[in-house]
Amino acid sequence: MKFYVIGSREIILAFKMTGIEGTVAESRTEVLEAFNRVTGKGGVANVPSTETPRVLILTEEAASQIEAEEIEWQKTGKFPLIVEIPGLNGHLEGRKTLSDAIREAVGVNI
């Protein structure tokens, strides 16, 4: 399964050490351009890779800058699936953790 990550330079470097490609994006414009490239939205060419990512990892900081676009993409039900992770400074206030989302959806505490 192919992964791709969008976030701060430090996060991208950490993922790159595990073999996962990514794009450093900190401003809304950079995040949106990278998001459109990975998802193929707006006719923008896909990421330079032999396989389209199945999972797109966004830092919470990056995701908060493109919330409307992310929600619209998730409604389509297409790949890549989007997963948000906390940045270097931890969770943003008011954001659900992945565990919270799973607990709400299926009623199981993990």
Image: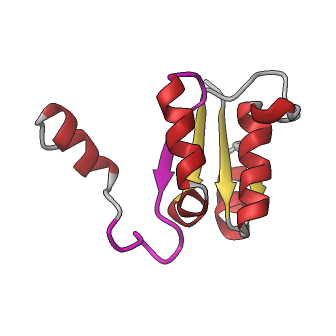
**Can residue 43 be seen in this snapshot?**
yes
Q: Is residue 83 magenta?
A: yes
Q: How many marks?
A: 0
**Prevailing secondary structure class for the magenta stretch in the rendered image:** loop
Classify residue 80 as left or right of residue 41: left
Task: Name, please, the residue furthest toward the bottom.
Answer: 89
Towards the viewer: 85 or 41: 41
- The residue drawn where x is 32% and y is 56% is 97
Which region is colored magenta? 77-94
Looking at the figure, which quarter contains the C terminus? top left
Q: Position of residue 49 (x, y in %)?
A: 84, 29
**Whole-percent x, y for residue 26 in the image:** 71, 69
Instruction: Say which residue appears at 77% left-offset and 30% top-offset.
Output: 40
What colour scheme was applied to this rendering of the protein?
A: secondary structure
Above or below, comparing residue 9 to residue 33 in the picture? below
- Determine the image quadrant of residue 104: top left
Horizontal and vertical percent position of residue 8: 68, 67
**33 drawn magenta:** no
Q: Residue at x 55, y 67 (%)?
A: 61
Query: Which image quadrant is residue 7 in?
Result: bottom right
Taking the spot 68% from the left edge, 29% from the top edge, the residue there is 53
> Is residue 22 in view from this perspective?
no
Q: Quadrant of the N terminus?
A: top right
Q: Position of residue 103 (x, y in %)?
A: 17, 42
Left or right? Give the position of 11 relative to 22: left
Q: Where 55 falls versus 96 (above or below)?
A: above
Asked whether 45 or 50 is in front, the reply is 45
Q: Does residue 44 appear left or right of residue 39 in this picture?
A: right
